[in-house]
């Protein structure tokens, strides 16, 4: 195992989330509200988006600095043309232990097998409701639920197991779905993960009152069927874990009510090649410019090391002060990829 680079708070660099596009075919109200991400929104021009070769080169450098896990995300990653090609390039990187992807599932039915064949090891599908009307209201483009469910079925057939199902819970919107989703995905081939609604970016109208805290999510689950508490897989695991009587696993990610910055080993690379050391960063560090100006691998390694060594981020732990007193500009979730 590579001795990883550590930040000021002794947190290693272990995970890299790579956004392959800032575009999305959904307008989830908590992420890309359509009033703000409309026709005149300036998405990144193609020339600014990292090529597969550039992503692969940076990934290899991150791996030599201690990264073991890569997660492809977006925007909607399956909108990126020829994505399986990138997956096979990353799959071959020496030292990589885990290659995974988060998708809204809308294009999964036709792509699941190709992703699997290219070497994708794991898959997370976001799904916030099993009710047609609520699902359409949450994606806000009237996207039919049946197509996401068909995508999940195709992923099971392609051999992904277990598949993670990410559920963002928002007060007054989808609480009734909490227990319903646990029931629907209760088998061993799934891990359902409930995520507290977060104040990422500046456009989703976040209010603390709209957050359903982890303890309340747990009560909603318990009142439906008894679930058994599981120990963490490893120290500092972000999700509290439970087992459904039918064998499926349940996780609750309490990023707002019980933050876990002390163990945060995640870096984020935006589609235009900026490195963000926190989900709530206002600005990224530009790696694209030096890379395109001809920086060598060792120069890029030095730039990334310097950034990570200076990292002090712990936004979620100091959230109350920040958000109550002086809200500051933050990058949007669709740019950073969650
Ligand atoms: N489009 C893909 C998807 O939705 O799965 C990948 C990108 S999306 C930004 C990654 C994850 O972030 C999704 O699971 C989504 O539900 C979650 N997410 C987006 N906005 C959020 C928010 N405000 N609070 C909590 N989770 C959020
Ligand atoms: Fe798109 Fe994912 Fe954001 Fe929804 S959460 S708008 S699917 S990027
Ligand atoms: Fe990591 Fe920033 Fe989230 Fe804390 S707030 S867990 S430092 S991404």
Image (tube, rainbow, N blue to C red):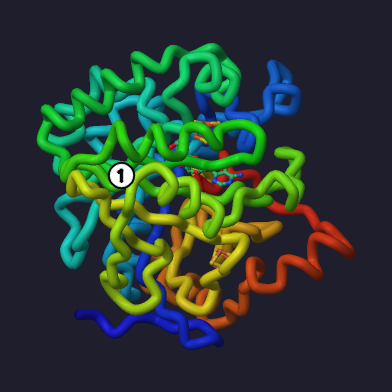
Pick whichever, 168 or 61, lies toward us.
168
Q: Across the whole image, how many numbered discs are drawn on residues?
A: 1
Q: In this view, does 286 lie above or below 316?
A: above
**Percent of width and height locating residue 236:** 40, 75
Using the image, determine if residue 207 lies above or below residue 135.
Answer: below
Which quarter of the image is occupied by the N terminus? Answer: bottom left
Horizontal and vertical percent position of residue 72:
36, 45
Residue at 56% from the left image edge and 53% from the top image edge: 216
Q: Position of residue 268 (x, y in %)?
A: 48, 57
State the residue position of label 1.
164
- Front residue (pair 85, 142): 142
Which quadrant of the render holds ligand 3?
A: bottom right
Q: Can residue 121 be seen in this view?
A: no
Classify residue 213 as left or right of residue 193: right
The one nearer the camera, 270 or 154, is 154
Q: In which quarter of the image is residue 233?
A: bottom left
Callout 1 crowding tier (Cα within 10 Å): few <14, some 14–19, many ≥20:
many
> Label 1's element?
strand
Task: Establish if 115 lies above or below 188.
Answer: above
Q: Which residue is at a point 65% across and 49% down the rendered structure image?
A: 211
Point out the residue furthest to the right here.
Answer: 325
């Amino acid at each position: 195992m590579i001795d990883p680079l550590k930040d000021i708070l002794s947190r290693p660099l272990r995970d890299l989330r790579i956004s392959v596009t800032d575009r999305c075919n959904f307008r989830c109200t908590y992420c890309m509200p359509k009033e703000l991400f409309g026709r005149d929104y300036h998405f990144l021009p193609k020339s600014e988006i990292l090529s597969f070769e550039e992503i692969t080169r940076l990934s290899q450098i991150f791996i030599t600095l201690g990264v073991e896990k890569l997660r492809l995300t977006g925007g909607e990653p399956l909108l990126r043309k020829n994505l399986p090609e990138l997956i096979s390039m990353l799959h071959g990187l020496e030292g990589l232990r885990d290659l995974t992807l988060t998708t809204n599932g809308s294009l999964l039915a036709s792509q699941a097998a190709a992703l699997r064949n290219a070497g994708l090891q794991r898959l997370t599908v976001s799904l916030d409701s099993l009710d047609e009307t609520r699902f359409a209201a949450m994606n806000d483009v009237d996207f039919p639920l049946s197509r996401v469910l068909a995508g999940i079925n195709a992923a099971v057939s392609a051999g992904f197991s277990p598949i993670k199902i990410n559920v963002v819970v928002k007060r007054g919107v989808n609480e009734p779905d909490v227990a319903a989703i646990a029931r629907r995905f209760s088998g061993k081939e799934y891990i359902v993960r409930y995520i507290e609604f977060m104040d990422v970016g500046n456009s989703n109208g976040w209010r603390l009152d709209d957050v359903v805290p982890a303890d309340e999510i747990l009560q909603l689950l318990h009142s439906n069927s008894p679930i058994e508490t599981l120990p963490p897989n490893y120290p500092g695991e972000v999700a509290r874990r439970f087992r459904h009587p039918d064998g499926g696993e349940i996780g609750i990610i309490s990023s707002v009510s019980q933050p876990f910055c002390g163990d945060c080993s995640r870096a984020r690379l935006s589609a235009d090649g900026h490195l963000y050391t926190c989900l709530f960063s206002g600005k990224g560090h530009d790696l694209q410019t030096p890379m395109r100006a001809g920086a060598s691998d060792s120069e890029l390694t030095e730039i990334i090391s310097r950034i990570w060594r200076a990292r002090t981020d712990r936004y979620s732990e100091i959230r109350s002060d920040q958000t109550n007193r002086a809200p500051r500009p933050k990058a949007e979730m669709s740019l950073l990829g969650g």
